[in-house]
Amino acid sequence: MELTEARDLRGGRSCWKPEDKPSLASEPPPKARVDVAIVGAGIMGAMLAERLSTGGRRVALLDRRPPAHGSTAASTALVMWGADVPLTHLAERIGIDEAARRWRRVRAAARSLSDRIDALGIACGRIDRPELYLAGTLLDERALEAEGDARRKAGLPSAFLAADAVAARFGIAPRAALLSAGSYEVDPVKLTEGLLIRARRHGAAIGFPYDVVAVEQQEKGLAVRTAEGTVLLADEVILATGYERAHWYLPAAFAVSSSYAIATPPGIAPLWRENAMIWEASNPYIYARATADGRIVAGGEDEDFDDAGRRDALIGAKAGILQAKVAAIIGTDTMPPDCAWAAAFGSSPDGLPAIGRAVNHDHLWLASGFGGNGVTFAALAIELIAAALDGKPDPDASCFDPYRFE
Ligand SMILES: Cc1cc2nc3c(=O)[nH]c(=O)nc-3n(C[C@H](O)[C@H](O)[C@H](O)COP(=O)(O)OP(=O)(O)OC[C@H]3O[C@@H](n4cnc5c(N)ncnc54)[C@H](O)[C@@H]3O)c2cc1C
């Protein structure tokens, strides 16, 4: 069995610049041993490569595709800290203190990422947006109010708004919502490329297409073997392979399904006030946001299956449904279509990622951002993995351990 699954990660046409030729040139893997080899050049691998290389480590990154050509190019990139599984639901399973601890840590990661993007001046269209979490089938109005109370007690900035207050302030159809601060949008492809350019400037080698087929323990470190016949030697290896799961190591609880998204042409937004990022407390949920150039990007309509042919056959129908549902949420009929796409989508039972050592390996790491907050989870992964590599394990590491459901 190969190291990771091989998937057709996305179909249709997304609104980022996905099919262009790569803006970074490839280079062969270094002959000299590196401190850290990263498999995967999506947002996860890019964040890891940037932070570890600027921290002084010798880094090599390999991908079977050009950088940012996997799931990252399909992302709708609402960078948020509210997870798919509500805080109150997670609290029922693990207690409010443990649930709140995880949520606070995810929020801190979202904030440290925005600080870093701004400090480094990465041109990825990062804009702070209010986040509106609308009452739905997962949390009705009363349950949403309780969710707001639980969040506030946990030190998380969310306020409950009644339906008429939502309509009055944001100019959308009336529906109760939690209003939260600390969310923002980015262009996920530009962010990934910006991070990789910085990583390269700090000595990281970025090679593609290299299909990593095995990671073998050798006497002094790990050997990363590619289908192209190269061997890269590394002290540590991080599998940032996204929804192409490293199936020997990633538990089956981290599952892959299908998701859909649409975008209008630029120049349509604003259709509602403050360009708030809107999503529903439903399962599956619909969400919508505006981009800096005035597109409305919306997504959802998830299906449980992961078959790419079946998934892509539904793009047209799903685009129509998304268009109609989003138009109803915002109370408009101005949703002209421009792009529609489908993609693999990874989830987990608690809506949180798998970050940590691979089972029975001291130097092989999993960085799998499963759950709707994949971009935030990449920021979290770098904090946890960098701390562990520095020999100062993060006290929250066990919260995101890949084997926490076993
Ligand atoms: C439709 C959709 C909407 C989303 N919306 C949001 C959102 O609003 N907010 C948010 O935070 N997140 C969102 N996400 C999730 C987020 O986009 C993902 O979590 C994130 O992009 C995954 O990044 P990654 O780097 O882990 O994976 P990828 O971008 O897929 O990168 C992994 C890379 O690993 C490479 N690879 C795999 N196996 C091998 C191998 N054996 N050898 C070499 N290379 C290999 C692949 O080629 C790929 O390029 C969304 C995802 C989808 C699909």
Image: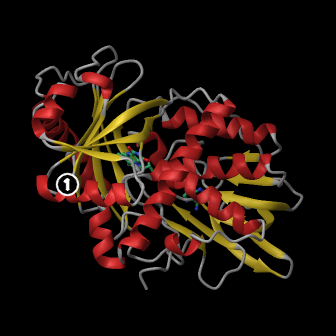
Camera-nearest residue between 189 and 374 = 374
Kind of residue at disc 1:
Leu
- Is 205 displayed left or right of 123 in the figure? right
How far from the left and from the top, in percent, is residue 282?
A: 18, 54
User: Quick one: SS at disc 1?
Assistant: helix
Camera-nearest residue between 398 and 322 = 398
Res 128 quadrant in image: top left
Q: Quadrant of the C terminus?
A: bottom left
Q: Residue furthest top?
A: 267
Name the residue rendered at 40%, 76% in the picture: 252
Q: Residue furthest front?
A: 153
Residue under label 1, please give it: 144
- Asked whether residue 369 is in view, the answer is no
Residue at mark 1: C-beta within 8 A of ligand 1: no
- Is 135 displayed left or right of 383 in the figure? left
Name the residue rendered at 62%, 52% in the picture: 45
Near mark 1 (Cα within 10 A), the count class, few <14, some 14-19 or many ≥20, is many
Name the residue rendered at 60%, 77% in the picture: 358
How far from the left and from the top, in percent, is residue 87?
A: 32, 63
How far from the left and from the top, in percent, is residue 6?
A: 47, 61
Name the residue rendered at 42%, 40% in the picture: 183
How far from the left and from the top, in percent, is residue 350?
A: 36, 68
Where 399 falls versus 80 (above or below)?
below
Where 358 falls versus 245 (above or below)?
below
- Is 281 displayed left or right of 399 in the figure? left
